[in-house]
Amino acid sequence: MKVVAAIVLSSLLIAAGIVLRPLIATEIPASERRSGYTFMSPDTKAMQDDDTTNPGMLGVIEGEALWNRKGGSADKSCADCHHDAKVSMKGVAARYPSYDKVLGGPVNLEQRINLCRARHQQADPLPYEKHDLLALTTYVAEQSRGMPITPDPTPELQPFVAKGRDLFMHRQGQLNLACTNCHDDNWDKHLASSAVTQGMPNGYPIYRLDWQSLGSLQRRLRNCITGVRAQNYDYGAPELVELELYLMSRARGMPLETPAVRP
């Protein structure tokens, strides 16, 4: 069945005009980089633009309640330390993943939330891709909506950015595809009925209509890895955080749209 699926997907790629070049693609110049929003239909754009119809805003509302809820052995809420998120969290999501001195490497926003829970609330971590962590992450990220992505400039992060870029460029799986083959080489084409975008990360957590729920960037990355029939990574794996870090550096200057809406 996997071989058949690979043949079918390869046929779709050829029909879409997507050529699997033997050489690594050229990265998109900064002046040509575009949000996934620009590839969407007018109806999907309208859904994202109107907070009363954007289904991701439910996560923002639920996240605000979690922000103010006390928990853990310390009986503290996020608000006890950070006060009004509209002030304290403004611009924060625009620079994540960020460097953690204790861990000596990058952590994404979900991991930072769980580190805060462990270090300051003495609370258990929230499970990846479950309601509470998605809602709280969406609430924090929404405070930076419209602000430009400004990656953490900490010099110690540069080797991790390079690792993320290597993974983006590395062919893998039964289909022998790299992220770059679709998102650098063949953006603005279609695979079946779906637009091939540039793979920018500026809308996450995101509400996808095919998921009927909010989802993290790591969920989307894992979907793509599964799609090329490659061995996947666990949520929170260093490889996925490094890939997030590279993608955010690739989207430098692009405004955050959280919670974005996609098909």
Image: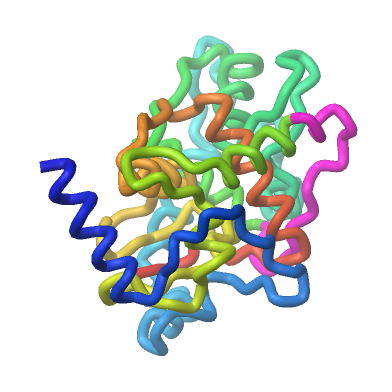
Residue 258 visible in the picture = no
Q: Nearer the viewer, residue 63 or 212?
A: 212
Q: To which quarter of the image does residue 119 belong?
A: top right
- Residue 229: percent from the left, percent from the top? 30, 40
- Residue furthest bottom as drawn: 42
- Residue 258: percent from the left, percent from the top? 55, 61
The number of callouts visible is 0
Quadrant of the image containing the N terminus: top left
Q: To which quarter of the image does residue 241 belong?
A: top right
Q: Nearer the viewer, residue 156 or 190?
A: 190
**Depicted 142 relative to depicted 226: above or below:** below
Residue at coordinates 53% horizontally, 60% vertically from top-left? Answer: 199
Q: Is residue 52 magenta?
A: no
Residue at coordinates 73% horizontally, 64% vertically from top-left? Answer: 147
Residue at coordinates 72% horizontally, 23% vertically from top-left? Answer: 105
- Prevailing secondary structure of the magenta residues: loop
Residue 27 visible in the picture = yes
- Residue furthest front as drawn: 22
Q: Is residue 152 magenta?
A: yes
Residue at coordinates 50% horizontally, 27% vertically from top-left? Answer: 236
**Depicted 256 relative to depicted 22: above or below:** below
Q: Nearer the viewer, residue 126 or 191?
A: 191
Q: Give the range drawn in magenta.
A: 144-159
- Residue 81: percent from the left, percent from the top? 71, 30
- Residue 245: percent from the left, percent from the top? 67, 41
Q: Which of 15 and 92 is in front in this view?
A: 15
Quadrant of the image containing the C terminus: bottom left
**Depicted 127 relative to depicted 72: above or below:** below
Query: In the picture provided, is 21 more to the left or to the right than 94?
Result: left
Q: To which quarter of the image does residue 98 belong?
A: top right
